[in-house]
Amino acid sequence: MATYFGWKGDRPSLGKLRRSVLVREATKGGFMEDITPKGFDVRTTVHEYGGGAFTIAGDTIIFSNYGDQRLYQQTLKGDRSPVALTPAYDGPVVRYADGRVDLKFNRYITVREDHRKVGKEASNEIVAIQLEGDPNTVEPMILVEGNDFYSFPRISPDGEKLAWIEWSHPNMPWDSAALWVGQISVDGTVINKVCVAGGDQTIIQAPTEPCWSSKNKLLFVSDKDNGFWNLYQWVEGNNVQPLYPLDAEFTRPAWNFGNSSFSFIETDGVPSGSQVACTYRQRGISYLGILDLSTNHFSPIQTPFTTIYNLFAREQYVYITAGSPTYSICIVKINWKNSTGKNEFSVVWSSDSIDIAKFQPYFSTPTVIQFPTKVTGQTAFANFYPPRNADFMQPEEEKPPLLVRSHGGPTSEADATLQLSIQYWTSRGWAFADVNYGGSTGYGRPYRERLYGNWGVVDVNDCCSCAEYLVATGEVDGQRLCIDGRSAGGYTTLATLVFSHTFKAGASLYGLCDLSVFQEDTHKFESHYIDSLVGKGELALRERSPINFLENLTCPVILFQGLEDKVVLPNQAEMIYKAVKAKGIPVALIEFEGEQHGFRKAENIRYTLEQEMLFFARLVGGFEVADDITPVHVDNLD
């Protein structure tokens, strides 16, 4: 059976026009087919990070269009022209994400983010949108409201109940949230609401990913017992039961809508009530298998992949987004019920359009290193990539330069999936360390909360400790240490440069430098995030803001910034650039028109890589790059 998936990436046929489209899996001997017509872009901006931008129900697709943020309905039969479902407002001020079709009432239940009240914080609700009629004559029906945030509205198979996740300021969804279930009444409203998990203030937990079985049993993920996100089941009477306790993470932090870490297996087209395909992550490695709820037995599915998420099951197939040190991110189809007993898989789509095998001699394979931090008895982790190039042998007397990367989030994780942007460095003689500092996910709540109150301290110390460990073990040259990071990782980079002297140069990609300005200007989703990471009050923000301690900065910095960034506003990069320039330290600022929080245009991604490499080579590395690159102007140097 054909399946569908979102495609986000460079489409050469589109030239410089970047858009996301839905694609149908190729039939045997056929080709993949674009479902989304020209002029439409499947993408939502709820919480700015989006996710959950489309839903498929039978032959009907409902999706959010990036340009106007309206919902559209599209059929795969006959005329495929999308038809608007939601009113046309004055610009993309009302946004939708993470919806499901309610067959009983012929409507679409989804999360709405409403920005129509100028000067006030956006409101979030769960609403119902009719699938027929004129969208401009009737406002969507509000089903659930009153809290700051909502996600995962999920309708039971019998159409009688609605489950959802909600949380409030100052929490992020991975801090403290609640799972609710309400009854859908005869008039379509939601009544008799019950809090399933998260209602007890003495038990801190972050439930997520509610999912109904065909027998109307509700499964979800929570970290309430052992500090790891594990699977639970709720049955009538408000009875919650753990299903497969394990010191492992069965989900990821909900930065985006639509996380899917488990799915009920289908038998003869009907979802099973007892078998669940699921994935979990343990110490940087993902595992995949089938959990039998009747026996709590987990049957592993062997694959070559070490990073797995976005899981979906249909018939005898499990579909995943996956990667490994030898596979870039790809969509994989696994036949878990093959008659041969082997779990055969095929790559449906890959983020790389090149012949990976051809370049294997130039790829560095990472190893997970565990190193001591500056806190006695504590350790942290990193994926370490030694330099590798089949055409070059490193002189025995020379140690390679090192680039340390501090990942974004900061509540996120660096995985070991093949990234050509990392191989760009290692194939040119650099060692590379992707650090999972304290505060990273994948290691349970206590590790995740090491950063709380200590952002700009724990992450800085762990990045420095990683570099110092690699110097001490003889892996890298202690005089050629550089650091970079994106978003929150850009903040860690800047904080590391002003609060320590471990590194000789740094690159910040759309990173923060003034936490006070960020808190004032940022969007609703993260407007209280810094309260947990740093603490409340102007003094706490000032003491952790790199912009206030530039007298400590002694090394060169290069900055990259999208001018349409709504998460970290461009003025952050401008502030640090002007201040460093005034100090007489080499600095460069590269700004990109049309780019938001995270660069999407291929030419800009390439230019960033090249200029960062050249900047470090000129100012720290002491060598000329092999590539023919024209350097950007560096103030106080050129």
Image (cartoon, grey):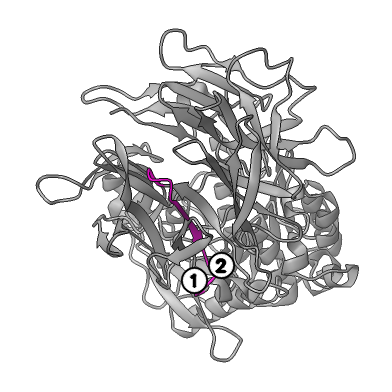
Q: Residue at x 50, y 54 (%)?
A: 625
Q: Is residue 78 above or below residue 275?
A: above
Residue 638 in view (yes/no):
no
In this view, the residue in front, 467 or 205, is 205
**Residue hosting label 2:** 440
* The residue stretch that appears in magenta: 213-226
The residue type indicated by label 1 comes to: Tyr
Dominant SS in magenta? loop
Magenta-drawn stretch contains 81: no
Q: Residue at x 51, y 18 (%)?
A: 74
Q: Residue at x 76, y 63 (%)?
A: 530
Can you tell which of label 1 and label 2 is closer to the viewer? 1
- In the picture as drawn, the residue positioned furthest to the bottom comes out as 376
In this view, the residue in front, 42 or 508, is 42
**Residue hosting label 1:** 443
- In the picture as drawn, the residue positioned furthest to the left comes out as 340
For mark 2, give the secondary structure. loop
